[in-house]
Amino acid sequence: MERENTTDVEGFRYSTLKSSYKRELKQSEKGSHSSQRSGRSWKMAETEDLLNEYEPLQPRADSGARKPLAAVCDPSRLAHRVVVLTFMCFLGFGSYFCYDNPAALQIQVQKDMKLTTSQFMQLYAWYSWPNVVLCFFGGFLLDRVFGIRLGTVIFSLFVCFGQVIFAAGALFNAFWLMEVGRFVFGIGGESLAVAQNTYAVSWFKGKELNLVFGLQLSMARLGSTVNMNIMGWVYGHMQSLQGSTGHTTLGATLMIAGVTCLFSLVCALVLGYLDKRAEKILNKEQGKTGEVIKLTDVKDFSFSLWLIFLICVAYYAAIFPFIGLGQVFFIEKFNFSPAEARAVNSIVYIISAPASPILGFLVDKTGKNVIWVLCAVVATLAAHMMLAFTFWNPWIAMSLLGVSYSLLACALWPMVAFLVPEHQLGTAYGFMQSIQNLGLALIAMAAGSILDNSGYLFLEVFFCASVCLALIAVVMLYFVNLLRGGDLNLSASARAKLQKSATSDSE
Amino acid sequence: MASAVNTTPLHLLFSLLVLQFASGFIVNDDKYKRQVSLELNPGLNASVRPPPGVGLLHVRALGANDTLHFLLCSLDAPTLMLVHTNSSSSSVKVDWRRFLSGNTSGSLRVEPQSSVQYSSALVFTRVWEYDDANDTADPQTLPPSSFLPPYQLQNFTWEDLGQTVNLTTDTARLCGQDGAASFRNGSFCLQISAFGSGGRDPGWPRLLHNANSSQLRVWLDGVTARSNFSRFFLELETVGRSDLLSRVDVLRSIDDEYTPSIFEVSQWVASPPNATSPVLGYTQWKPVAYRSATPNLEQATPCRHSEPLPLARLPPSGLVRAYFGDGYRASGLNVTFGIAGDPMYSASKYLSWTVLVGLGSPPVDSFSPVVIAIMAVGLGTPMILILVGGVCVCVRRKRVEPLAYEPIN
């Protein structure tokens, strides 16, 4: 029994289903944060099992006569893995940086392209549309069609071309072209996150994996934060360079942002080369996502799982579209300067970087996931109500939002693993991602038109209503779980006991 | 792709629903009602012919035991005057011959004079144009050379007010042109809306009004800018009793559902110097102007006002001269349209701004029933669920308990 065979990874005992929760946990941090962008790391759970077979990253026996390599060049040495890690982290930087370009430049985009807010929010909707479908196929494409190396390069190319088309749309003053660009960008962006995780597992499995996931997550946050705070400045420089503002200024600024995507593409190429090289030197295979998707599994999903899906859609709908529109909101309602508005808008990302591991650890040690989710949802509701009904300094509300958002990610995503047999995990997470993207696309468009017609108070009330829906789902989940005797809300010690008895039963 | 195409109708449906919700509920907080009647040139007989373009609109808003008179006149600078009487039979008396000859105080009276409780006037005196080449949108910091000669509204030729009076909607419009070439295709217009009860106009900024107020929308349409970077500002004066203080209060409001993205309301109030006594009359506006005749969020442009200054003499208005005498004083301020970075006037050749003029304290916005309903349902449902769920669980546990084994002794 490979699975029972507990492998010690960073002090975590992995065994069967129940313990994959921990992996999920780490994954989910990544996934969910990155906005919708993520959540698929869970697939690693299976990957790790797959990879167990290649576990020892040792030089092949027959290559013993090979002359020793410098530490930096030797794939089996830490120094080399650090080099690889650097490229891995920057692999996703471009897509995270460019994902929130519209939010960072909302005023400029709307002014230069003469857009209504609902048209502006289409840019986010178009990013989400391809992922409604791709969540099911991204892993398949990586595993079966392209392989991880080629796949990563292809997805990076999509990200690059998407951003270039997006910028070209601004240069030529063609909004439809910008939408096409976001669509192409969306095809690449989300799948690139999966590829990044797969690389991480393939290189660091059984070694510094959790740390690597943590670092990648921090890089993602860094990308978003830097974007939020620097794009306005870049635009300002382009403006003074060209001496006027207009769609060409915007186009040029977005082209410059595209350099980060190009940089990520270079990282993809280098990683592909290093991975190939490692394969030659070591007895190492291409990483696999190990994702198995069977759409017919959907009929087996329990009511509790559907409730989790509902929480996921309703909750994230009140986060990402809000951040997309946040900057102008802080300027208009709280009279913030654009720079300060961008800073407060990015605080959610900044907080989530350090808070995720800490809160993940907390949830991990205490269990009681439903209660944690409940706390996160209530805190988010409080934050949104503060923003809606008070003039209190938005730093308070946004910090609260940042913490609760990180907490929800740590507590919500792992729950799926308790409800679904392991062989259906791929389908369940794929489905969750897919409807999350569907929800985000629809809510982004709705949010834009609500703002255009009824203003910010109504928009905030709409987000509050969305969080309330999530709250209703959490409360129902709590009672359903209580009445059916589910183990979603067990404390960590009870869970360990249960797992112990399950293990002894199977023996 | 398919999903993207399929959801477009969904999106439409959704936004329609939202629109429906947002516009379907208009609160009428103020239940007080008045009977509104409009009359053009009250008391004018055939013996006197006013010069073309001069008209006097009298709006009589009759309450249970008081009357509000609103008078809009185009003789010299356009003026809206408000007179409040505590009699339900007060009337406006105009000595037309003297009124039209000008410079005669007392040619317009509200009788009986002892019933008059409060009177004030709002006068639009000048439209200023300035060259904002550095895009600061702050005329106070600009050198005098940036200012183009202002348009004196008292010199405007006004169109016939009588043709625009609409008795079903209780509105009338006053449009005028300057003789200059820049006004060949342009006009400066004021539209008055009188109200018999509380409510809101359908068009933005959707100011809340009540039976004690009437609304003026002012717009500048199609004027040819005299410089490449022209912006405009408007000079306003109010006339009120000289013992009253004139100040502008800027209130912040969390509620922008009627005027999206505007979280402030400015009110130019006249109040007794005693700080605790209530406001007697007001001119209220939201700091926003629109650059299109069909206002939307993209065409909104912020506006700012200067501090009101007491003025030495009364404004050049026929109504003010005819009604106000000693004991009244004027104060004036400027309302600037646009902020740095906003498009110049010539980009849209349109600017529209709305003020509410009324008696007593200005109306205060409150949440619409939709907002209250959504929050009540949103917060109430989880509470009820927790209660019901808690009771259910307790009941179940109780029912299960007797079934459990109990010690025999």
Image: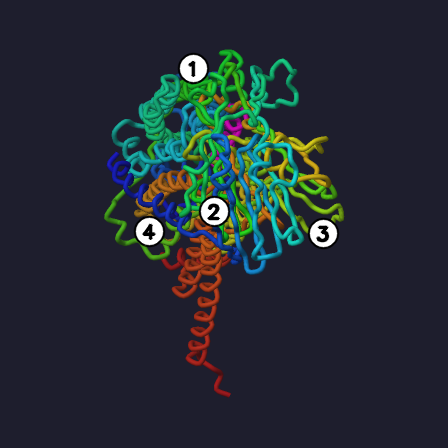
- In-image side of A257 versus A300 (left or right): right
- Residue at the outermost front position: B47
Determine whether label 2 and label 1 are within 8 Å by CB. no
The tag on residue A67 is 1
Which of B337/A36 is in front?
B337
Distance from label 2 to label 1 (Cα)?
103 Å
Q: Amino acid at mark 1?
A: Lys
Magenta extent = A209-231
Q: Amino acid at mark 4?
A: Pro
Q: Are marks 1 and 3 on the same chain?
A: no
Name the spot of residue B312 as percent of width and height, x first.
72, 31
Distance from label 4 to label 1 (Cα)?
47 Å
Q: Are marks 2 and 1 on the same chain?
A: no
Mark 3, residue position: B277
Q: Nearer the viewer, mark 3 or mark 2?
A: 2
Rendered-image quadrant of the C terminus of chain A: bottom left
Looking at marks 3 and 2 on the same chain, the residue that comes earlier in the sequence is marked by 2
Q: Nearer the viewer, mark 4 or mark 1?
A: 4
Q: Amino acid at mark 2?
A: Leu
**Residue B366 appears in the rendering:** yes
Determine whether label 1 and label 3 are within 8 Å by CB. no
